[in-house]
Amino acid sequence: MKRITIDHVTRIEGHAKITIHLDDAGHVANTQFHVTQVRGFEKLTEGRPYYEMPGITARICGICPVSHLLASSKACDAIMAIRVPPAGQMLRDLLHCAQIVQSHALSFFYLSAPDLLLGMDSNPEKRNVLGLIEKHPELARDGIELRKFGQQVIESLAKERIHPSWVVPGGVNAPMAREVRDQILATLPQANAIAGRTMDLFKSKIEGFPEEIAYFGSAPTMYAGMVDAEGNLRLYDGKLRFRGADGTIVQDQIAAEQYADFIAEAAQRDSYLKAPYYVPEGFPRGVYRVGPLARLNAADRCGTPRADRELEEFRQRFGRVAHSSFLYHYARLIEIIHALERMEMLLHEPKILESHVRAKAGVNALEGVGMIEAPRGTLIHHYKVNDEGAIVWANLIVATGHNVLAMNKSIQQVSQHFVNGNKLEEGMLNRVSAVVRAYDPCLSCSTHALGQIAMRIQLVGPEGELLDDLRSE
């Protein structure tokens, strides 16, 4: 048995490695995806007051702190047993849309575009954001501007771009000024134009990746995402829906507090990341996916006009339920368009400027669950407190966790199709990393890698002899 180890998967948030096991003929036998870090937030928060949880758990990640902030605040709302005022709900929703835009822009332009526009087999010294700026300066500028737009909206609402304290249990801690609303509305047209240009460019390039579409995690699975009662995509509120690989709705309108009836977690020997699975199917059969592609598969429609037109074209190309994980990139662009449209709808709501934005209460329930669609998929915060409101137990199920079983299968499929174990080539190994990047996993925070293979890969024979060696300098 031979083994290839990719010690560092580049251009993802966090730290992971991949092991590829080969048989004696050099064919891929199996693969393993290892998450090699421990954060411990579920334990270190025990004993803290519940109302501190949004600020603490937002520190889990510097890329998507808003998502943890919102999911945590929703769990605290449930502990307080209150109804957030309408203006507070809309402002939370608006902030979340800005988070979706900036995070998806980071994933597409900074982490994945080097593969998509420079080529999977291109020179790794150039296959990074700097190489993208050199070859596609207009696109790179668009990526910077679109991400900046999302971050500036977050800052204008919450007064901070990273780890804002504006979202609190019960709502938000200050209303939005009229001039802030007008400023965001004035900058939306440029963001919409960038999203449209990027979508057109991507659709013109996607035909150049037939093998990746066919083999980048294309095995059918179930899909999960939040929808409203009419089946429209919902990112901030709504209830969870599972859709089967054949397009049938497996389970619908699962409230946050019901999640444990349908989602459980299994420990894995080779990773610190637990593997959620669909309870009725059991482990490991209950594989499902979350995130942009899964949300579009689960929902009937986006619920905003431009995004719905793009979704209709997407389904004409790839079917009502699209299975290739390569299409996560396409789905992210559709969701950017949807988030921008929803922002405009919310900003035109007169109630969004109302001053009553927060409800206050003490502990009225000893348990609370918050659920939201983070950029990478369904995020669940579940807390239990004592009578004084101190956390006695916490469980967080992050989007990357939901996807880990599917990512493992995707890595194996890509490896079996592209990897020639008798001769290592950088491009084939880049594809193994690229299928992980398609999911845009958030393992803690960004690695800040530029795209060069930051790793050493060794091909070792059955007696331990070194057969081949590939490393970055």
Image (cartoon, grey):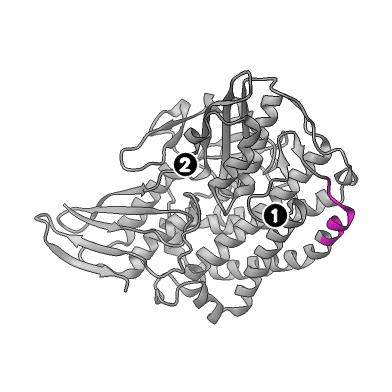
Q: Is residue 106 visible?
A: yes
Residue lying furthest bottom: 134
Q: Nearer the viewer, residue 114 or 423?
A: 114
Q: Is residue 299 visible?
A: no
Q: Quadrant of residue 456?
A: bottom left
Left or right of residue 456: residue 171: right
Give the amino acid type for the residue marked by disc 2 in the picture.
Gly
As helix, strand or loop, the secondary structure at mark 2 comes to helix
Residue bearing mark 2: 401
Which contiguous range is marked in magenta? 175-183
Question: Image height check: is 349 above or below 76?
Answer: below
Residue bearing mark 1: 160
- Label disc, if present, on residue 199 of the rendered structure: none
Give the residue displayed 33% in from the left and 62% down from the top.
Answer: 418
The CA distance from mark 1 to mark 2 is 28 Å
Q: Quadrant of residue 120?
A: bottom left
Residue 176 included in the magenta stretch of the image: yes
Which percent across, then down, holds residue 92?
Answer: 74, 44
Q: Are marks 1 and 2 in contact (CB under 8 Å)?
A: no
Quadrant location of the C terminus in the rendered image: bottom left
Give the residue displayed 60% in from the left and 53% down from the top.
Answer: 315
